[in-house]
Image (tube, rainbow, N blue to C red):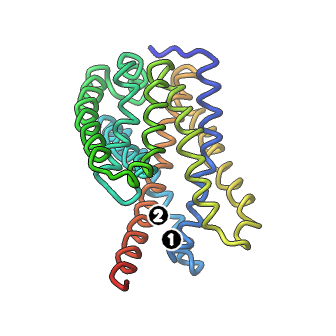
Amino acid sequence: MLELSPFVLVVLTLAVLAGLPHGAFDFYIAKRLGQLQSIPQQAFWASRYLAIGIGFIAFWVVFPVAGLSVFLFVSALHFGRDYYPQQHGLALAAGTIILGLPMLFNATIVNTIFNQLMVTPVQAEWIINITLVFMAVAAGMIFLDLLKSGKKALSQRANLIIALGALFWSAVLFHPLIYFALFFALLHSPKHMREQWAKLDSNQRKTALGVIAALTVMPILAAGVVGTMLQGTWDQRLITLIFIGLAALTMPHMVLLEREHHALGMANRDDKTDG
């Protein structure tokens, strides 16, 4: 059974709360992609966004091993995009290393965390072992990319090198949940929020804080309602809520960001063709 100190739970909860606003920028991403030009479009977008999240929770409950596996895969690609925005394979590799480091140094604890996410210890062990195999391949891919990069390209990879170094020691020194909290609150979320804020025009920035606050509070209230329906101790319910809740938010968030990455990639190719 997973037993967590109050310190770990408080840090994890605060990190997730600090990171939630970065998903609230999805409204503005959808607007830039032309998905919110009319009331019917807005209603369709909101309905589809909710349907993806709720549908994935249902999928996870019915097929927990597949649900956790898909969540890890999507999260790896999503986190790796911070360092390789347009290179799918390398993005997945970087994200696999980020997710795999706690499994490498604290496999037993990660196993107990996965048990709270509806998989058995044996199933969790399989997921961990497979992830570690992929992590070894991913490390080779990243190493080769750094090796073949010129000095200019290598300097552009400095953020990745520094991040992986910091995360390596975080995985060695800290509880896996503290590791996740540090990554989510200090690396991933701030980067996303800075980038998305820079894309807002002056008029959008005037109303953005209110919109983002509202879209941040809504999932917190929903989590509170769902939490009363779960079984187990309060700390077990909190872990289940945080990770399955993040999965429900990550899936539509990831779908939207992939559309944005695709649109940017197409725009870059068009610019090169025109040039």
Q: Residue at x 38, y 19 (%)?
A: 105
Residue 189: image x %, image y %?
57, 46
Residue 203: image x %, image y %?
73, 73
Separation of residues labelled 1 and 2 (CA atoms) = 6 Å
Towards the viewer: 139 or 51: 139
Outermost front residue: 151
Q: Residue at x 35, y 19 (%)?
A: 107
Give amino acid for label 2: Arg
Instruction: Indicate the quadrant containing the N terminus: top left, top right, bottom left or bottom right.
Output: top left
Instruction: Indicate the quadrant containing the C terminus: top left, top right, bottom left or bottom right.
Output: bottom left
Residue 182, relative to residue 250: is it above or below? above
Q: Is residue 122 left or right of residue 1?
A: left
**Other residues around mark 1 within 10 Å, as few (<14) / some (14–19) / many (≥20):** some
Residue 165, relative to residue 85: is it above or below? above
Residue 272, relative to residue 196: is it above or below? below
Q: Residue at x 31, y 39 (%)?
A: 69
Give amino acid for label 1: Phe
Residue 104: image x %, image y %?
34, 23
Question: Could you tell me if the residues under marks 1 and 2 are in contact, i.e. CB atoms within 8 Å?
Answer: yes
| Tag 1 secondary structure | helix
Q: Residue at x 68, y 56 (%)?
A: 212
Q: Is residue 137 left or right of residue 80?
A: left
The residue indicated by pointer 1 is: 44
The residue indicated by pointer 2 is: 48
Where residue 85 sits, quadrant-wise, is bottom left
Outermost bottom residue: 274
